[in-house]
Image (cartoon, grey):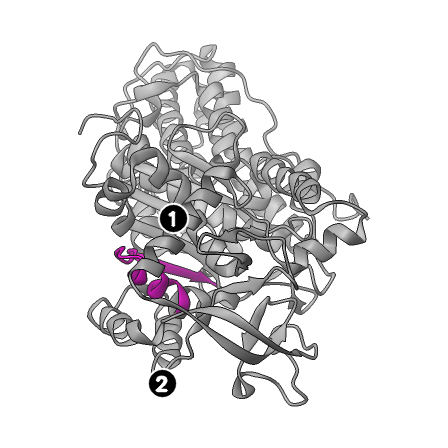
Amino acid sequence: MARRQDLTVAMSERVHITTAIFYCNGAPHVGSAYEALAADTFARALRRKLGHDQVSFLSGTDEHGDKIRRAALAQGLRPKAYTDQMSELFRQAFAGLNVTAAARKAPAVDFWVRTTDPVHERFVQEMLNRTYQRGDIYFRDYEGLYCVDCERFYTDKELLPGNLCPSHNKPVELISEGNYFLRIEKYREQVLAHLRSNPDFIRPERFRSEALNMLAEPLTDLCISRPKARLDWGIELPFDANYVTYVWYDAFWAYVSEPATRLGLEAFAHDVWPHTEHFIGKDILKTHAVYWPPILLAAGLPLFRHLNVHGWLNFGGARMSKSSGNVADPVSYERAFGHDVLRYFVMREMVYGLDGDFSEERLIERYNADLANDLGNLVSRVLSMAARYFNGEVRAVPQGVADGVYQGVNWKTIEQLPSPVINRVTEDLDFKRALDEVWTALDTANKYIVTTSPFTLARDPARLNEVAQILANLLEALRVIADTLEPFMPVTTGKIFDLLNASGAQARAPYGHGLKAGHTVNPPIALFPRIEKTARA
């Protein structure tokens, strides 16, 4: 399939990937970075299958609502000036982690959306008008229990004893006012039918079961406005200038607004939106499984492909969050340990969909064992031998290694890469097992060195041809392993390709078709110097 240069061409296989739109009332932390890194890894892997321009990746910041207004006032700033600072903080943090949607020079198919962008605000008003004209938005007086931190109303049965918010453990406020409501109960059965006929609509399965339970009983229609008399920091309703849009209704459309504006709404809705992959945390499952589908249907748009739900990243036994104050700065880890280390750690440690624990001690253990010892040491040993014995020149044609020739060496784990690893990510969301397979290949290459002992053979000039073959196989193995690691460790992959002097199609070729006889590689550098556990004390 020919590569596409922009979004102006109808594409049957285009996939649109989104993170949640991050609420910028506080700085990004490792927990929010985990979601961005998982989505970016998925996007990079999918581009390997479909082509770069067949995948769009979107992230951004949610900037309206009362929490933002209060956070801005606490710093003596107007809300827009505050969100300008905070959105840039998020964008720079994620760009520093090599999340492509946040890159300063992002490809045309990547998006960093701010809900205060004029394009987004106009689009939200267009969707409000569209839904209002279809008869699915109405006005009524309302009294309800409201959580400022959640920026939503709760029913009595949703609250903890003492009228406490279940998410923030704080008392809710009783508010009485007139507001506009969206008819979501009208679409409940349609959403239920979609979940039942598409068992993988919400992944993993446990979250689909939760969503089915949430939709099992009639829904209270969704309040989608706030009176300006109480809150004026939001997008004005196009049909009533006395109200602004509820922040959640506003934020959902960030998934759509900029790409749909660029491509055209009808083309986007037909060619791209049905192939959308949302990545969110389990704390916002209800909003995305119960509210977002009716919002789309009420605007006359189709549903997305998958809702991919991850667990919480815990720190010191408690959920990592801005409200708890136990946050860890992701950029500080990138600076302290180097590129790709945080990305590798969270992808290898976390089972997608389950909660996981983050600790610096465990990160250092992974760094030393996996990156310094396994990957870094393999690269160094192979390139050092190539430089020492052959001045960096590949002197043989890379070959396979037959099963059973060397005990414990199953060369097929290398030859078959990267397909099984890419499929683990794109089909199963199994980042951990995908990396396990890469490390099985690394283990194979390391065992091959031990069993063939090229450094011993090289002492006999008559056996240098054997050494040349072993190193040709190992250099080609390094190339394929690096290529497979690219979605997980893009900077490290680039460094290894530079060391191997491999680029373009050569770098991405199947095993045996990359480094030819006569190719010259570079001397090694220390990719991952070991870290003593006291280094960051």
* Quadrant assignment for the N terminus: top left
Label 2, secondary structure: give it: loop
Q: Which mark is residue 217?
A: 2
The answer to whether residue 354 of the structure is visible from this angle is no
Residues at marks 1 and 2, CA–CA distance in whole angstroms: 31 Å
| Residue type indicated by callout 1 | Glu
Q: Is 293 part of what is drawn in magenta? A: yes
The quarter holding residue 266 reads top left
Residue 526 drawn at (x, y percent):
61, 27
**Between 469 and 181, which is closer to the camera in this rendering?**
181
Please report the bounds of the magenta region as a residue range.
291-310
| Residue type indicated by callout 2 | Glu
Q: Which mark is residue 126?
A: 1
Taking the spot 30% from the left edge, 16% from the top edge, the residue there is 516
**Mark 1 against mark 2, which lies toward the viewer?**
1
Taking the spot 35% from the left edge, 23% from the top edge, the residue there is 507
Q: Is residue 409 left or right of residue 228?
A: left
Taking the spot 34% from the left edge, 70% from the top edge, the residue there is 205
